[in-house]
Amino acid sequence: MVTVTGLTPLGGSSSNTGMTVTVALNHGGHSDIAHAVRSIVAAGFPAGRITERTLAAHLPYPDMPPVDLLIRTSGEMRLSGFLLWQMAYAELVFLPDLWPDMTSEKFRDAIETYRHRSRRFGKVGAQ
C-alpha cells in the first residue's frame, strides 16, 4: 500500500488544506480486521469496553483517514476486500479501464462524478 499526503486538491479551495491518496494493490481488509481483533485481545481489553474507536486504533494503519472515494479500475464491480473498515461510507466509482491505462483525464472524470454525489454517511434522505 502506498499513501501520499499533503497533496493540493484539484480545483483548489480555501477550505481544503490537502488530501491523502492511497493506492491499495492486493490488499486484504479481512486480515486488517482480524489483526485488530488479535491486538485488542492481546492488550486485555474487556469485551464491554471495545468500541469502534478501539478497533480503528488497532488496525494496521490506524492513522489512515476514512476513504471518501474508491476508484475501482478493470471493470470489476466489487470491493475485493480493500480497506473494509475505512471504506464504510466511501463513494464508489467503477471504471472499465485497467490500472495501467488510467490517465489524468479519467481520474478527473472520476473526481467530477464524486463531486456530484450526495454524501450522507449512513443516513437516508433528509435525516
Image (tube, rainbow, N blue to C red):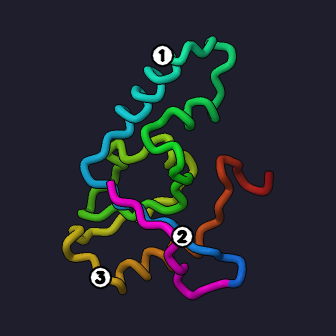
Classify 10 Å Cα crowding around label 3: few (below 14), some (14-19), many (20 and above).
Answer: few
Residue in the image at 24% along x and 68% along y: 99
Residue range corresponding to the magenta coloring? 1-13
Horizontal placement of 79 versus 102: left or right?
right
Residue nearer the viewer, 25 or 73: 25
Residue 113 is situated, as x and y percent measured from the top left of the image, at: 50, 75
Residue in the image at 28% along x and 56% along y: 76
Question: Is residue 102 highlighted in magenta?
Answer: no
What amino acid does circle 3 point to? Thr
Classify 10 Å Cα crowding around label 2: few (below 14), some (14-19), many (20 and above).
Answer: few
Residue 30 is situated, as x and y percent measured from the top left of the image, at: 37, 33
Viewport quadrant of the N terminus:
bottom left
Tell me: residue 33, above or below residue 125.
Answer: above
Tell me: residue 48, above or below residue 17.
Answer: above
Q: Which residue is mark 1?
A: 42
Classify 10 Å Cα crowding around label 1: few (below 14), some (14-19), many (20 and above).
Answer: few
Horizontal placement of 24 versus 124: left or right?
left
Residue 98 is situated, as x and y percent measured from the top left of the image, at: 21, 68
Q: Marks 2 and 3, how far apart in space?
A: 19 Å
Residue nearer the viewer, 109 or 65: 65
Q: Marks 3 and 1, how far apart in space?
A: 45 Å
Question: As drawn, which residue projects farthest toward the front?
Answer: 43
Q: Which residue is mark 3?
A: 103
Q: Which residue is mark 2?
A: 19
